[in-house]
């Protein structure tokens, strides 16, 4: 197997990037950029598995690249591009649709959540979405994939598909089996309104999430309104087990302030949650608002962002075409 490490990950351009994307993914993207070659993709083909207004989609693709750069990704170091500009994603996805099994897809919990009660009405694209995700990763023969915990099952499927392709076409080690890189501490940032649901772009209430473009006032208001607990902050994690909203706030504070959970509990125990919220709003404002300001600034120069995508698209396409040529050969396509 090729020993060369290569990171690939993707983010959907479906609206505001939020704290979950930042802690679960973007911040790790930036760290990895220092250690390995990295390819980061705005996955517009994934976004259209649910209907997107075309003007919003165009705007959101640029906003997502702006988010990449504002959090610290360097387009001269990492490849930043959008998925639909490299047609190999769609081509490999088709080939992998023929390798992946219906039984495997039927187990995907995210499809069940997203399709809701009326699965007959969900797009076919939404159902086979995890195969496209496998294609994204395997098109570049990526070895490491940084994601939040919500993508773990999709990653496992990508591994199964890679393995089955290698077995079916008798080409052991052709596709590396991609390793998920999931942060141990904040792999799942939860909604500020309901600690049992993940923070997401699709939850109706904007009060459920901190967006990277939120102003200081927004952050203060949202943190103030966040669900917590009427009791005082305990001195141990065990007492927080049945209190997901309180646990979520403490986790976020620990992550942003870079203090361990034990240190946070030592600092906070016996205090009211209003104290934690005040401190949390402060650290969030100092970490998040500069990113939001930078996103807004970058969005002022659309052609600069388009130029970055164009360069990234060209670089990604070269790697994709080379790998696809070999895939076609293995499969017997001429
Ligand atoms: P997406 O666009 O939903 O989210 C982008 C990244 O943010 C992470 N994330 C979270 N992490 C922690 N807590 C949260 N509340 C939270 N919400 C989102 C996600 O785990 C993800 O890492 N299918 C993927 C995109 C994708 C992809 C890929 C990822 C397409 N192809 C190939 C990796 C490799 C998705 O919808 O992410």
Image (cartoon, grey):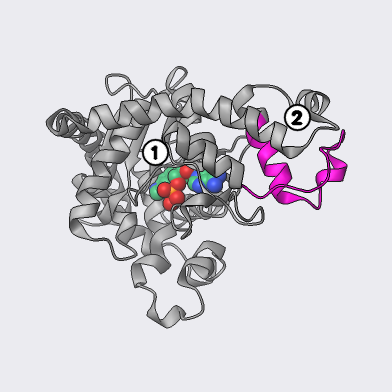
**Residue pointed to by mark 1:** 141
Q: Is residue 46 left or right of residue 32?
A: left
Name the foreground residue: 122 vs 215: 215
Q: Residue at x 35, y 72 (%)?
A: 123
Queried whether the magenta region covers residue 62, the answer comes back as no
Q: Read off the magenta span.
A: 226-253
Q: Is residue 202 left or right of residue 149?
A: left
Badge 1 residue CB within 8 Å of ligand 1: no
Q: Quadrant of residue 249?
A: top right
**Residue pointed to by mark 2:** 261
Q: Residue at x 71, y 32 (%)?
A: 275
Badge 2 residue CB within 8 Å of ligand 1: no
Instruction: Give the image location of residue 196, x and y in percent.
Output: 66, 56
Q: Residue at x 63, y 23 (%)?
A: 257
Does residue 72 lie above or below 46 as drawn? Answer: above
Q: Residue furthest left?
A: 303
Q: Residue at x 34, y 52 (%)?
A: 14
Residue 167 appears in the figure:
yes
Q: Are marks 1 and 2 in contact (CB under 8 Å)?
A: no
Question: How packed is label 2: few (under 14 Cα within 10 Å), some, or many (20 or more)?
Answer: some
Q: Is residue 62 left or right of residue 176?
A: left
Give the mark nearer the N terminus: 1 vs 2. Answer: 1
Question: How packed is label 1: few (under 14 Cα within 10 Å), some, or many (20 or more)?
Answer: many
Label 2 sits on a secondary structure element that is helix
């Amino acid at each position: 197997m090729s020993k060369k490490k290569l990171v690939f990950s993707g983010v959907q351009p479906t609206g505001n990037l939020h704290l979950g994307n930042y802690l679960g993914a973007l911040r790790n993207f930036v760290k990895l950029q220092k250690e390995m070659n990295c390819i980061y993709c705005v996955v517009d083909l994934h976004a259209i598995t649910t209907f997107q207004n075309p003007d919003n989609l165009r705007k959101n693709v640029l906003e997502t690249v702006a988010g990449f750069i504002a959090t610290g990704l360097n387009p001269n170091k990492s490849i930043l591009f959008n998925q639909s500009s490299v047609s190999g994603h769609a081509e490999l996805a088709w080939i992998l649709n023929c390798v992946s099994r219906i039984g495997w897809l039927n187990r995907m919990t995210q499809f069940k959540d997203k399709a809701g009660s009326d699965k007959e009405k969900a797009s076919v694209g939404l159902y086979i979405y995890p195969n496209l995700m496998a294609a994204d990763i395997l098109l570049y023969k990526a070895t490491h994939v940084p994601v939040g915990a919500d993508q773990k099952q999709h990653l496992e499927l990508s591994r199964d598909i890679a393995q089955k392709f290698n077995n079916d076409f008798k080409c052991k080690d052709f596709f590396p089996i991609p390793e998920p890189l999931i942060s141990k501490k904040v792999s799942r940032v939860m909604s500020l309104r309901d600690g049992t649901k993940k923070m997401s772009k699709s939850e109706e209430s904007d009060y459920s999430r901190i967006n990277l473009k939120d102003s200081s006032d927004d952050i203060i208001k949202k943190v103030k309104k966040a669900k917590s607990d009427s009791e005082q902050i305990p001195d141990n994690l065990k007492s927080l087990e049945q209190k997901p909203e309180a646990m979520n706030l403490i986790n976020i504070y620990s992550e942003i302030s870079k203090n361990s959970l034990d240190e946070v509990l030592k600092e906070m125990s016996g205090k009211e949650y209003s104290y934690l919220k005040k401190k949390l709003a402060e650290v969030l404002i100092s970490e998040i608002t500069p990113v939001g300001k930078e996103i807004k600034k970058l969005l002022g120069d659309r052609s600069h962002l388009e130029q970055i995508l164009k360069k990234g698209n060209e670089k990604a396409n070269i790697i994709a075409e080379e790998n696809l040529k070999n895939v076609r050969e293995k499969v017997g396509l001429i």
